Image (cartoon, rainbow, N blue to C red):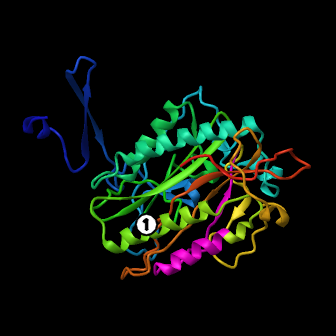
Amino acid sequence: MGQGKLDKYNLDRQYVVVVVIEEADGSLSSFFDVGTSVPSATDVGPWLYVLDHGRERAPTRPGFNYNSLRPYRVSPDMPVPDHIAKPDYFTTGDPVAERRSEARNVPPILSAAQADSMRHACRIGREILDAAHRVVRPGVTTDEIDRVVHDATIAADAYPAPLHYVNFPKSVCTSVNEVVCHGIPDLRELEEGDIVNIDVSAIVNGYHADLNETFAVGQISKEKHDLIKATHDSLMKAIEACVPGMFYRDLGAIITKHVNGCGFQVDKTYCGHGIGEFFHCSPNIPHYAGNKAKRASSASEALKPQTPPNPRRGGVAWIGRPRVPLLFHPLPWHAQTWRARTWYTPCRRRCRCRCRCRATHPVSS
């Protein structure tokens, strides 16, 4: 718009919105509109600060003693097409079926067909996470990452599980620097040297994928690099130890031993969890030593020789997510630098299935 046209408007109270559209043939077209603000209010449009678990929004930043990060405004929720199957919490924010399910207390045993559905869902989830990774760079907002994840999920005929789950307002969790987990995408631009964890959860044909990874934004410090590597390697060591019959609590000891040896410690606030037809279910998988998690199967089975995995058997699906805070940074830096993998642990409960397999089979990488 030329300066002559701008001179016709009161820029103190009016604003101009210009939209440029690229046509199918490559040509560009544009149009504009003019709005007038209220003198006593600040124009923020639909981008507001999120309050009360996403249920309410406010035009002013909530008061809190923040560290290096500050909350930024959050854009409106992305729409979900009618043809996408939606969970019960889509309209209410309350996952009623999950809360009332027996799976909250008893690990659900997957049949062979259900295990195949889980593998398919996790492959879709990995593709969505890769799409998000491709846009991570300085200057990109986490809101843009949310858009990419949302569009990729819808394109796969899946539902972004975080959207409206307990009133979460976005389709992915993006946790930058000291945010431990479940960060809400907003209009803050990623900066050189940041680390950002992207936590993707998709519902594919009724089964959940839930995986995440921490990415470097440009060049990061050696401390952050060592933190990410220590966390990744602790996860790999835990995976190598997974066999039916082992205690879930033993995984925490393995992770803690490696992490402490690297000069870090495990964040005990959160843990891994079961997954399948529900977003969160039994079992819980603590990542720290000395936890009281229940065993995976009978102790006698842990001593039996191991055999190759049989993908046609039933089992339990769960994810492990060690969190390791960075203690060397001058700020109280609790970075969500963790990755997750979903395991398929063949069942040995004779009352529920007739599984004869004694090894684990990874669902996703």
User: Compared to 337, does 134 lie above or below?
Assistant: above
Question: What residue is drawn where x is 30% and y is 53%?
Answer: 137
Q: Secondary structure at mark 1?
A: helix
In the rendered structure, the answer to whether residue 293 lies left or right of residue 335 reads right
Residue furthest toward the right?
351
Foreground of the two, 351 or 141: 351
Q: Which amino acid type corresponds to the residue marked 1 in the rendered image?
A: Ile
Residue toward you, 254 or 194: 254
Quadrant that contains the N terminus = top left
Q: Which x, y percent locates residue 165? A: 62, 50
Compared with 95, 116 (above or below) is: above
Q: Position of residue 220 (x, y in %)?
A: 30, 66
96 vs 66, left or right, is right
Which residues, given as a range, are shown in magenta?
A: 251-276
What residue do we see at 74% from left, 59% from top? 283
Q: What residue is at 90 percent from the left and 50 percent from the top?
A: 350
Q: Furthest-front residue in view?
A: 305
Q: How many marks?
A: 1
The residue under label 1 is 228
Give the residue furthest to the top.
25
Is residue 149 toward the left or the right of residue 211 in the image? left
Image location of residue 256, percent across then percent down: 58, 76
- Residue at the spot 85% in from the left edge and 65% down from the top edge: 300
Give the left or right position of residue 77, taking residue 6 as reference.
Answer: right
Closest to the observer: 244 or 341? 244
